[in-house]
Amino acid sequence: MEKPFAITLDPGSSLANRTGSWRTYKPVYLDRLPPCNATCPAGENIQGWLFHAESGDYEAAWRSLTENNPLPAIMGRVCYHPCEGACNRQHVDSAVGINSIERFLGDEAIKRNWQFVKPATQSGKRVLVVGAGPSGLSAAYHLARLGHTVEIQEAGPFAGGMMRFGIPKYRLPRDVIEAEVQRIVNLGVTITLNAKVSNIDESMKAGKFDAAFLAVGAHIGKRAYIPAGTAAKVVDAISVLRSMEGEEKPMLGRRVVVYGGGNTAIDVARSVKRMGAEPIIVYRRTRDKAPAHDFEIEEALQEGVMVKWLSTIKQAEEGEITIEKMALDDKGFPQPTGEFETLAADSVVLALGQDVDLGLLDGVPGLDVKDGTVQVGPNMMTGHAGIFAGGDMVPSERTVTVGVGHGKKAARHIDAWLKGETYVPPPKHEIAGIEKLNTWYYSEAPHVVRPTLDILRRQSTFEEVVGGLDETNALFEARRCLSCGNCFECDNCYGVCPDNAVIKLGPGKRFEFNYDYCKGCGVCVAECPCGAIKMVPEEN
Amino acid sequence: MSFQPVKFYQTGTFTVGNRLLAPEERSVQASGKRFNSINSGHRACQGCGEALGARYAIDAAMEATQGQLIAANATGCLEVFSTPYPETSWQIPWIHSLFGNTAAVATGIAAALKIKQKKNPRAQEIRVVAQGGDGGTTDIGFGCLSGMFERNDDVLYICYDNGGYMNTGVQRSSATPPAARTATTMAVGPEPGNAFGQGKFLPAIAMAHEIPYVATATVADLRDLEAKVRRAMEIRGARYIHILVPCPLGWGTYSNETIKMARLAKETGIFPVFEAEHGEIKSALAIRRQLPVEDYLKPQKRYAHLFGKQPNVAVIAKLQALADRNIRKYKLLEGV
């Protein structure tokens, strides 16, 4: 080609210069595990469903949520949300109100009548689930979605277990339980009520079940020896809460002493307050040592529940009890002081924890029962092949969320066991701690506070205390999510690369590096808000 | 503020884009169809702030003029790394000039386009940008630039300020900040590093020419930078944009800290981000989370002599006083 004067070479593009060869470290995209997901006892992919909620696609969010937990409307009310305690946003302003968004999605699903998708094929295997509490319902749901035929046998007159007989209405309205249980029934799960399994072996043989999941809960109130006169009325907390569900409300009198410092004690006190009584909680240690969640103690105190901290009951008589003052020793244990006090009391409610009724396991070989609970392996299987157990009847923290988590975990292992396989959970991603994030990029946005019922109505009715979010503030709250460790397509890496070495793949497809030109400067990693890129050494 | 910030949407207008925003609410850089005026394969160091700033600014100018843009480029890092013969990274009409005469070359192009308009009115759609580093702008090309301002030629001049002659081995320029170590202002003697009370802040000189538009920006505030380029392209006459572009080599920072350093310069008040029309300040980008100057100085090796076993508190205090004066003068805490 004829070239102009003094020109000897053709003009060329710098694309001929592969600057990627300079690199000693290269950026790679990855998904890290958000702390909320890592903490959730039910194994929810919280960041995952918030991602859909952020764009206003609540149905996709709900479907993503229910991949792991079939009870969002319940969970959005009663879960103690450890996720929020782990949320990285607390280091920015305050944690994302995950629980309130979960409730919003759950309520939205009930309002819009969203249903679960039935499995495409049936396995032909039959699984018996004993107990229609959170753990049993969760296991049944997951097993049904995996194509198995599931029957739940429930001893009580209603489904819900402790959610119904242990959690008062003002925290969990019954129509919410009904709606979420009905949706699981619609999926194809059979629930037989008033069907107490007294011998698991027989029940399995009778129903030709291939496997069983036991989740009978812990319904027997623990007793403590208290010297009591014959006329003194001493009852246990669980039977009080259970009787609230029936027609005949418990007759406890006006002055009710509740003995214990756990959530059940608070629930009983707040419930009897609503029935017009004057509850006094007696607890042997201090408020900060009480096992009840502090917000529940706070709500109870607001409602006018009295508490005697550092006190034990020495004697119960008709119309009065004697309590002894305690003092904490160096190790934080309460020690008697010899100082006594008399309190007027029409009845004493013992809220000292619950035991499991293990009668149905009598005569089953291979079982290991320790401290009143059934021991299970990492796969949730008891010592007897094919019998799995979870929820309050196995050693663990006793919450609805843990129960739901057990149900899911057991379902996966039961499914594998039925196929003659072993379920190996996928390896966990590394945690996306706050140090992996660049929080400069998030807008200032204070936490949305849920409306709370007026104090007068809280003292006299069983209306729900904590309200829900509406669509606008639920969307706002969802968008407070930092999306820790998972790309949310903010275009930062694509924008900040000095070498145009990031390729934008389009909506929902994220990005990719062009390693021909990436020099490995690491600006994309430093400026990624959510910590979804990391630098790794080049091999050569 | 130069642009209307998006109120919330998770990241508002802080990130380059965001899937929750409508495409027109995102930055030019977020678009899959951006011009990439300066393409891959250029030979800038890892994490070069100037390569990034140039793409931000010229892409925005290309967007604003629908691609009808001619750029004149001063000698300097930007030219050396983008156009080693026979390769070029520029995907726009681009002309090389000497170190000191870019403004004059751009003036000539603008004059030629004015003549062309007589035959073809569409020639007025073609706009002219001149660009250079701080050496080519504040030192060597200053005479030509001042003339361009004074004649109010229809040129947008963009200065990429990295505070020195970086590609020749980090020598001092009149934009090198006080106390900074360069090859010609060593960290030795009783007053180590660059002297206080010397050098110049060209945006203020440009304002003194009372030209239609003067603005400063950094590579850490993309939305602000793009809005200023867009605004500049709406105006005819001489315009000047001064962009702070951190230099990992010359500043002694890690290559991944480029944007962070620009952000710290703005958040400490060391570098005021504002815009002015006809010599009067119109807006300032407010400091979001004010920080002491140490946070900006410490990561940079060019200030390492201030943080030995005995930190040089007196000098740090003088630098803090400069930042405080900027904050006062440009109302950086409240924003305008």
Image: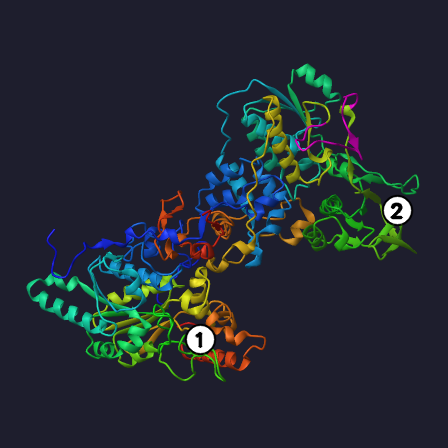
Residue A37 part of the magenta-drawn span: no
Kindly identify which residue carries mark 1. Answer: B181
Residue B175 at x, y percent in the picture: 36, 76
A91 lies left or right of A442: right
Chain of residue at mark 1: B
Measuring 49% from the left and 34% from the top, which residue is drawn there? Answer: A114
Q: Is residue A512 visible?
A: yes
In terms of secondary structure, where does tag 1 sit?
A: loop
Q: Quadrant of residue A192?
A: top right
Quick check: B45 left or right of A408?
Answer: left
Residue A480 higher or lower than B319, as above or below: above
Alpha-carbon span between mark 1 and mark 2? 86 Å
Q: Which mark is residue A319?
A: 2
Residue visible at 74% across and 43% down in the picture: A264
**Residue B55 locus on image (x, y percent):** 31, 60
- Magenta-drawn stretch, dominant element (helix, strand or loop): loop
Q: Nearer the viewer, mark 1 or mark 2?
A: 1
Query: In the displayed structure, would residue A67 be above or below residue A212?
Result: below
The image shows residue A266, relative to residue A421, as above or below, that is below
Q: Which residues are magenta?
A: A362-382
- The amino acid at mark 1 is Arg
Amino acid under label 2?
A: Gly
